[in-house]
Amino acid sequence: MSARSENLRWLARKCEMAAAAATDPVTEANFEQEQKQWLLRAEQAEKVERDLFVRSSRHGRPRAPRSGR
């Protein structure tokens, strides 16, 4: 798991804890929805990382990511 996906999962856990501590149903639902979004982003980040690894391994040695210049 990459640092990015770990960070996204950490944010999802924070939302889970906030939902559990929420005092009203609307706030709880908002935090639960936000948690789902963070988990989805984490899954997407892991998929992108896997795809990049597979693509680079097909072409020989892995390449460093390009800088955005």
Image: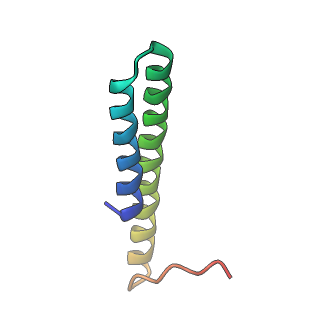
How many marks overall? Answer: 0
Q: Is residue 59 above or below residue 2?
A: below
Residue at position x 43%, y 27% from top?
32
Please provide percent x and percent y for residue 54: 39, 68
Q: Which image quarter holds the N terminus?
A: bottom left
| In this picture, residue 37 sits left or right of residue 50 | right
| In this picture, residue 65 sits left or right of residue 23 | right
| In this picture, residue 67 sits left or right of residue 19 | right
Q: In the picture, residue 2 is in which quadrant?
A: bottom left
Name the residue nearer the viewer: 26 or 51: 26
Q: Is residue 58 above or below residue 8?
A: below
Name the residue nearer the viewer: 54 or 7: 7
Which residue reaches farthest top?
25
Please provide percent x and percent y for residue 21: 34, 25
Please provide percent x and percent y for residue 30: 50, 25
Residue at position x 68%, y 82% from top?
69
Please provide percent x and percent y for residue 18: 38, 32
Q: In the picture, residue 46 is in which quadrant?
A: bottom left
Which residue reaches farthest front?
23
Scheme by which the image is coloured: rainbow
Residue at position x 45%, y 13% from top?
25
Residue at position x 38%, y 27% from top?
19
